[in-house]
Structures are given as structure tokens and as C-alpha cells.
């Protein structure tokens, strides 16, 4: 794969699909395997999140199991993308609904 192709893939935003009826679980598209979706749960690991991708399972999860504190360095690209989606798309709607309910 050419350097330009790798750069183009790295800059392509990952697709995010919320799971119906779930606030914190998402399917996030894979950059390396088009059409593949990873399951992300943002509540797992004390809010760090959990993903079924190889990077998370092999590199991040073991450190979290040993007691590492949640941080961006222990989140794969899929978790970071799901967090961005939650903060940009879901949280504003939730805040608006709560404001209306409390008015």
C-alpha cells in the first residue's frame, strides 16, 4: 500500500452506529477491514471503554486489568471515535431533553 493510500485511510472518519436502546454502546467501522464493525461499550473499564478490536484486546485491556487508570492512551481509535460521537451527537440532545423536562 502506498504512503498516500495509508494517509487517506488514516484520515477517513470511522462510521459510528449507536445500538438501539443503548446509550453507551456503538458499532464503529474498521479502517483496516472495510465493512467490519467493532463493538464499543463506553461504560466498561470505569468509563475508559471497551472494544473488541485486536489493538484494544492485546494492548489496552491488559493494562487496565492490571489497574491502570483510564486515559486516552488506553483507548483504541474505535473507542475515541465513539466517545466523540457521544459527546458531539448524543450529549447535546440529552441535555436539551433534560432542560425541557426540568422547565
Image: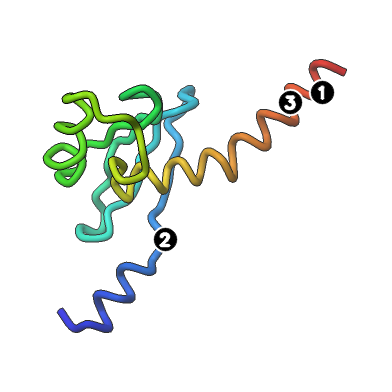
* Crowd class of label 3 (few under 14; some 14 to 19; many from 20; radius 10 Å): few
In the image, is residue 87 above or below residue 65? below
| Residue 100 horizontal/vertical position (percent) | 82, 23
Task: Residue under label 3, please give it.
Answer: 97
In the image, is residue 74 above or below residue 62? below
Query: Element type at marker 3?
Result: helix
Find out whether the residues at labels 2 and 1 contact each other: C-beta distance under 8 Å.
no
| Residue 102 horizontal/vertical position (percent) | 82, 16
Identified at 21% across, 60% down, the residue is 32
Task: Residue under label 2, please give it.
Answer: 13
Task: Residue under label 1, please give it.
Answer: 100
Judge by depth and name the residue closer to the eye, 52 or 69.
69
Judge by depth and name the residue closer to the eye, 103 or 61.
61
Identified at 14% across, 44% down, the residue is 54
| Quadrant for the N terminus in the image | bottom left
Identified at 18% across, 24% down, the residue is 65
Amino acid at each position: 500500500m502506498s504512503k498516500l493510500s495509508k494517509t487517506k485511510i488514516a484520515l477517513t472518519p470511522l462510521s459510528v452506529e449507536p445500538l438501539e436502546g443503548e446509550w453507551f454502546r456503538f458499532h464503529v467501522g474498521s479502517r483496516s477491514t472495510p465493512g467490519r464493525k467493532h463493538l464499543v461499550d463506553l461504560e466498561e473499564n470505569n468509563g475508559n471503554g471497551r472494544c473488541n478490536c485486536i489493538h484494544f484486546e492485546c494492548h489496552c485491556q491488559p493494562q487496565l486489568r492490571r489497574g491502570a487508570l483510564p486515559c486516552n492512551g488506553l483507548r483504541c481509535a474505535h473507542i475515541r471515535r465513539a466517545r466523540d460521537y457521544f459527546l458531539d451527537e448524543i450529549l447535546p440532545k440529552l441535555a436539551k431533553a433534560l432542560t425541557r423536562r426540568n422547565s
